Amino acid sequence: MLLFVSLASYAQDSFGDNIQILLSPGDSLRRLGLVNGAIKLYRQRYQEDAGDIVNAYNYSCAFAVSKQIDSAFKYLRPAIEKDSTLQALVDPDLIHLYNDERWNEIQNEIIEKFQLKSGKLKKVELAKKLLEIKALDQAYLEEIDQAQEKMGRDCAVVDALWDLKDRINKKNLKEVEEIITSNTWPKISDVGTEGAEAVFLVIQHADINAQKKYLPVIKKLCEDNEAPCENYALMYDRVEVAENNRQLYGTQVKWSTNANKYVLYPIVDEKNVDERRLHLGLMPIAQYLITFGIQYKPQ
């Protein structure tokens, strides 16, 4: 059972249901980038009900984002006490805790509880590394969204944040390729779903050469049930779009400055796109595109 939802996880570049989440006043301020104000509201709520673990978790995340490390650890421990998911280990809000020795203790506690419920991981240390890489892959996306909303997409602050993301992505790619070279591609059966997903995300955010290189590997993993088939669909379409071809599964959209909205890249044999998506276990394209605010009308 997922006991809490970090705000930063909303920005993940992955598939998922179009779920509406009711935000607390503190969460709303976090969405606006007003972290100090959010901390005050989380504190008020914590004083009212220290047992509200959702609030305690987001309270901890806000402290972590503002680099108040001791306070972040103080409220993180009770928040994760009864949780058996890996949510905290892939949360980009918590990346500033990684260099503290207490983080290793938190990692071990979470992994132990996860394994008691979900079964042993064959490669625990590798899984821990990949979970950190996944969090770093998702880091600063919320801040980029906030900057774009306040100052527009074409501004120096947004460009600087994307430059930071590019440096993180290149570092992640280097580490992931070293892992692949020494261990082969990490499988779900070795490092769990979250760990295996980290490798896909890093390759997805790499350049076209890396994407083309590993696309056959992702396809084989999909066929062997060692990776979600939506990973293959997303990567396949991304490569096709990058090479100015029509996409096959309708996973790729782009922001149109003129229209001020997301638009869908062209699809080959569009009348049969949902049949192809169904074959891979994907939701209908109209449902998928709602996430991007696109009201899909077949061509």
Image (cartoon, helix red, strand yellow):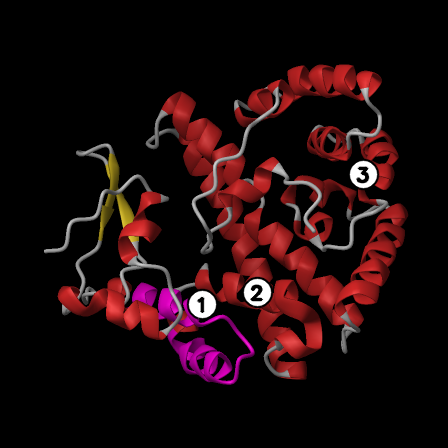
Quadrant placement of the C terminus: bottom left
Up-down: is 173 above or below 71? Answer: below
Tell me the SS state at disc 3.
helix
Q: Which residue is mark 1?
A: 231
Residue 253 shown left or right of residue 36 in the figure? left
Q: Earlier in the sequence, mark 1 or mark 2?
A: 2
Q: Residue 58 at x, y = what percent?
A: 70, 32
Identify which amino acid the numbered label 3 is placed on: Ala
Q: Which residue is mark 2?
A: 197
Report how far apart the C-alphas of labels 1 and 3 lie in the structure: 31 Å
Q: Earlier in the sequence, mark 2 or mark 3?
A: 3
**Quarter residue 154 falls in:** top left
Q: Is residue 2 magenta?
A: no
Q: Residue 109 at x, y = what percent?
A: 87, 55
Q: Which residue is mark 3?
A: 79
Q: Which residues are magenta?
A: 212-239
- Check contact, mark 1 vs mark 2: CB within 8 A: yes
Local crowd at mark 1 within 10 Å, few (<14), some, or many (≥20)?
many
Local crowd at mark 3 within 10 Å, few (<14), some, or many (≥20)?
many
**Quarter residue 271 falls in:** bottom left
Answer yes or no: is residue 288 visible: yes
Q: Residue at x 57, y 53 (%)?
A: 137
Q: Residue at x 47, y 53 (%)?
A: 16
